[in-house]
Image: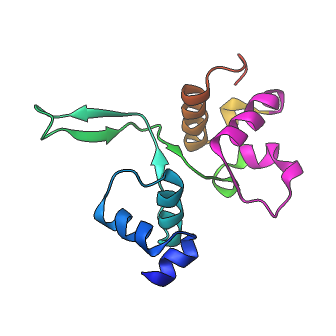
Amino acid sequence: MTVAAETAGISRVTWHRLEKGEFGVAWGSLLAAAEVLGMQLHLGIGKAVGDSEESAVLVLLEDALPLHIRLTDYPGLRRLAWQVGEAVDTLSPREAFGLYTRNARHLDLDELSPGEQLLLRALRDVFGEATADV
């Protein structure tokens, strides 16, 4: 536990609080711990399904937005991100949306994979319709 907490850049106490599921732990700590454990967390729009609050289950919709967008997973975005170089392999959702909207004229939406089209739709849902082209 100590090594994992140090690798995540958080205290052992914070790591313990995360393990216990305590409220009030910063999102940054949760994300750092998840990364150390090799997990990916996704932000998504969800809906509660169930008869009562106790039995409700949060169901993520198909267009969940990842917290880190890997350029290797989205070839269209990789082409638009040529200026960041090979050293950068992930972007934040806001950075990806900015690239898509600023460079929409260079993008053929019909050539995007279904996964990349879902990503683009999720980015639009979160950040709004910046242009009519994207």
Q: Is residue 78 above or below residue 102?
A: below
Does residue 1 appear left or right of residue 94 in this picture?
Answer: left
Q: Name which residue lies at 33% across and 67% down.
A: 19
Where's residue 117, x and y in %?
59, 35
Q: Name which residue lies at 42% across and 55% down.
A: 25
Provide the residue span drawn in magenta. Answer: 77-106
State the quadrant of the N terminus.
Answer: bottom left
State the quadrant of the C terminus.
Answer: top right
In this view, the residue in front, 33 or 14, is: 14
Q: Is residue 26 above or below residue 96?
A: below
> Does the magenta-highlighted stretch encompass residue 97?
yes
Does residue 119 appear left or right of residue 42 in this picture?
Answer: right
Q: How is the image coloured?
A: rainbow
Where's residue 61, x and y in %?
38, 36
Q: Name which residue lies at 49% across and 75% down.
A: 5
Where's residue 105, x and y in %?
83, 27
Q: Name which residue lies at 55% across and 70% down.
A: 8
Does residue 96 appear left or right of residue 124 in this picture?
Answer: right
Q: Is residue 60 above or below residue 24?
A: above
Q: Is residue 110 above or below residue 38?
A: above
